[in-house]
Structure formats: structure tokens, C-alpha cells
Amino acid sequence: MPEWIVMHEEGNCDLFPFYFFVEPWGKRLKPILGENLDMLVVIREGKMRECVVQEQYERAGRKVFESLPSAFPHYMERTDSWLGRVEELCGKLEARKGWNEASNAELNAEFAAYCETIQNLNTWGMMVTLMEYAKSSFVSDKLYSLVSKHLSSAGSKALPTQVISTLTTPFEPTFLRLERKQAALLALEKKRGKGVSAGIDALWKNYSWLSYGYAGPILPREHFELEVNSFSSLSEQALEEFESEESRIAGEQERLAGELKLTQEITSWISMAREFMFKKEFRKQLLYRAFAVVEPLQTEIASRCGLSLKQVRYFTPGEVSLLLQGSLDGSIAVERMKLVAYLIEGEQVKVFSGKDAELLESVIVPDKADLTAKELQGQCAFPSAKPVVGKAKIVMNAEEQGKVGVGDILISHSTNPGMIMAMKRAGAIVTDQGGITCHAAIVSRELKIPCVTGVKTATLLFKDGDLVEVDATRGIVRKLSS
């Protein structure tokens, strides 16, 4: 039996979203990389653990990495194509008034087409993700090596991590940056005495899915009203600067690159990393939008099958088709909601519950750490002018983000858009996994919050309430007291 290690943990999950990760990597990568990848997803009462075989994913990540830079345009072209199709699909589903008049066959066809589109996006969109996945950081390591050598030979005192963080920040706006720009514009109008109620309604309509995650819910209108009110405390100049964020980032990068006289090789890798980071985050946010807008269709399917929305999301798309045909007993959802294991191994996809799922759960290899350590080293994702000190808050999933107060140190295995509200409140962000291209790194730059990634064992070493110092510029996290 393979050695399964946990790569991602999340709460408030059901089986449905993981079909779009398990199936593409387990069945669709062989023509591209020469092999498919196994994956095990275990969900116990909503708590999910995504497990992989480290050596297998590292080998695949290396293959993608070694295909660069020549294959990069092809990866991005295919990703762009499917991003466009998923955006079109989301618009179509959002415009749909209801599904009650559709036949079972029509519901099945719509759902199958939806699933095929999302699968294709993930097949290509997650290709470059393999380079910074499963404890691998090929792109981050390559950039650090190139930039470090260049700065050393030039006699520069600039820190490699700070240079990389600045130059790889995408200047194309993600959905998060677009939402914040619009909220800032509304705050500016409010300061000038204009009414903003209709604008907040529009903000809610367009971005309520922003932290939907794998299973929702959407954000309430009050979230956007509070955000606009919070921005209203900023000066008019600060609010106006949101509008010029992209040009400011591009200008700063151009100035720094010219000042450091970067080589063509470094410039090429920086450019790839910047585009890779943007597409990675854009794809992830678009997926959460897609998971949110398909809810009405799933609700109608559930109703026809005598199930709740939650229950129907514990069936694979193929099983949903059988449910609609009346040839599958939906009562198995009850057992799956307690414990389910979704396994793809050797291109064979199987869903287990009960004792079979318990057996698979028992072979997951737990993480280990030196619990006597006082200091951990990671990578600078976004630097800080000085070390940040705050109370540690361990957040393994979006359900736990409420315990993060203003100025706390958010420590997680890895972050995702469902944690965005906690990330906004944090004084600094620390993750076990990831490099300069991970979600925490991208969002920390959007929010300008110090961040250290790839620390490996922070969630094991620290506990809630520990006083922690984060020197993000040097990638060092220290425990000051328990």
C-alpha cells in the first residue's frame, strides 16, 4: 500500500468539489506527462484530508518544471482557453431563472457538461501547480538560486526574497483585487456624501461567492457594507491609490529590474512566475464561483431524488446520473456523510464508506515535527519593515477563522479563499506548505500583510495563544513564549 501523506486539510467539505481534482490528475495527465497521479481524499463529518504519494507528485512536478520555458506558452494558452469557458459557464448559470421546468434528462445533461468543463480547466490549470505542490517548490527554488547569485556577483545588499516578492507580484487584477478596488471607490463616494446602497448591492451580487470555498455559504450583503465602512476611515488619497494599483506595481517592478540589471534568464523566469501566480489564483477563485453558481442546479437535482443539497453533494457526477434515472439508492449518502474515502489509484476511481473507508483513513501517515524547536525557517512571501509579534492562531480550515483577531498570527497548513476574512485581520500569515506562488503568498501581497510560507511544521510546533515573532523579510518564525 502506498504511503499517503496529507497535503491539504479543510473543514465544511463534501465529496462534490474533489471530483474536479481527483479525476483530472488520476485520468487525464498521462498523455501530457506520461503518467497519471494517485490521490486519496478522506472526509470525516465534513473534515477533509487530501493525501498524495509524495514521490509521485514530486516526479510529476519535476517533469513540468523541466519542460519550461519552452512548454510554458502552451500550458498558459490551454489554461486561458478553459478559464474563458468556465467564466462563460458561470455567467450562463447565474442568468438561469430556475430549473423546475427542466426534465431529468436535461438536468443530467447540464450537470455533465458543467463537470466536463471544470475538469478540463483543472487538467490544464493545475499543470504548473504541480511544480509547487506536495512539498515541492521547483519554481521558488530556481528563482532564489538565480537571484541570489546575481545579487552576490553584483555586490548588491538587496535581499533575494524581497526582490523576488516584489518582481513576481502580478499586476493583473485578481477577483479579490477587483472587489477591493470597487469597495474603495464606494468608500470614496461615501466620504464625498454620495449614496452607496445600490453600489453595495452590486458588489454583493458580483462577489458574494468570493469566499465560498468548497461548500459555501456565500458572503452576506453585510460583509460588503462593513468593508466599505472600514475603507471610509482611509484618506481620499489612499482610496484613490486603489485605482492605480496595477500601474504602481508595474512601475515599481520596472524600476527595480532596471536598477538591478537583471539577466535575460532571470527576467524570463520572473515573467513566468508572475503569470503562473496570477493564473493559479484566478483559476482557484473562479472555481469557487463555479461551485457557488451550480448550487441551484444541484438543489433541483436533490429535490427530484428526495435528498438534501448536502446529501446530493456526496455523490460523484456519474452517480448523480444514476440517481436521476432512479437506479441508485440515495440513502447511502447518510453513511458517506459520516465518513467517505475517495480514491483514485492506477486510473481506477472508487468511493468507500464504513469500515472500508476507516481502513484507508488508518494508513494516512501523520506529520512529524521537532516539538522542542523555538525557530522555524521558511520563504519570504511578502516582507515586513520589522518583525511582527502576535498571538498564534492555528487555522486549518475556514470554519476556524473566527478565532483570528486583529493582529494575530494566522498559522495554517495552507490557506484558501475561504479564509480571506481571517487573512484580512491577521498581523502576519505563516503556512507549512507553499512557496512564492501559493495562495497565501498571492493574497498577502494583495493585502500587504507579512507572510512566510513553506515552514513545514508550524501547525505542529505552535498552538493557539503562543506569542510568536514573524520576521517575514528573512523567512523566520520564532516562538517567544507559550
Image (tube, rainbow, N blue to C red):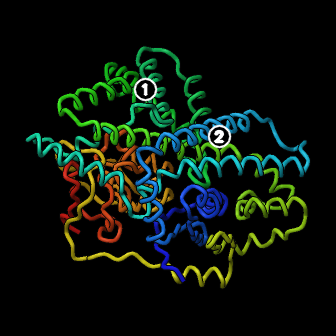
Marks 1, 2: nearer the viewer: 2
Dots 1, 2 in contact, CB < 8 A: no
Q: Taking 227 as reference, is 12 left or right? A: right
Mark 1, Cα crowd under 10 Å, few <14 / some 14-19 / many 20+, is: many
Mark 2, Cα crowd under 10 Å, few <14 / some 14-19 / many 20+, is: many
- Residue at left 33%, top 59%? 454
* Disc 1, SS: helix
Residue occupied by mark 1: 184
Q: How far across and how far down the image is residue 473, in percent?
A: 20, 48
Q: How far across and how far down the image is residue 24, in percent?
A: 62, 58
- The reply to whether residue 95 is in sight is yes
- Closest to the observer, 226 or 397: 397
Residue 86's tag is 2
- Residue at the outermost left position: 155
Q: Taking 168 as reference, is 22 left or right? A: right
Q: Which amino acid type corresponds to the residue marked 1 in the rendered image?
A: Ala
- Quadrant of the frame with the C terminus: bottom left
- Closest to the observer, 21 or 352: 21
- Residue at left 39%, top 36%? 170
Q: How far across and how far down the image is residue 195, in percent?
A: 52, 18
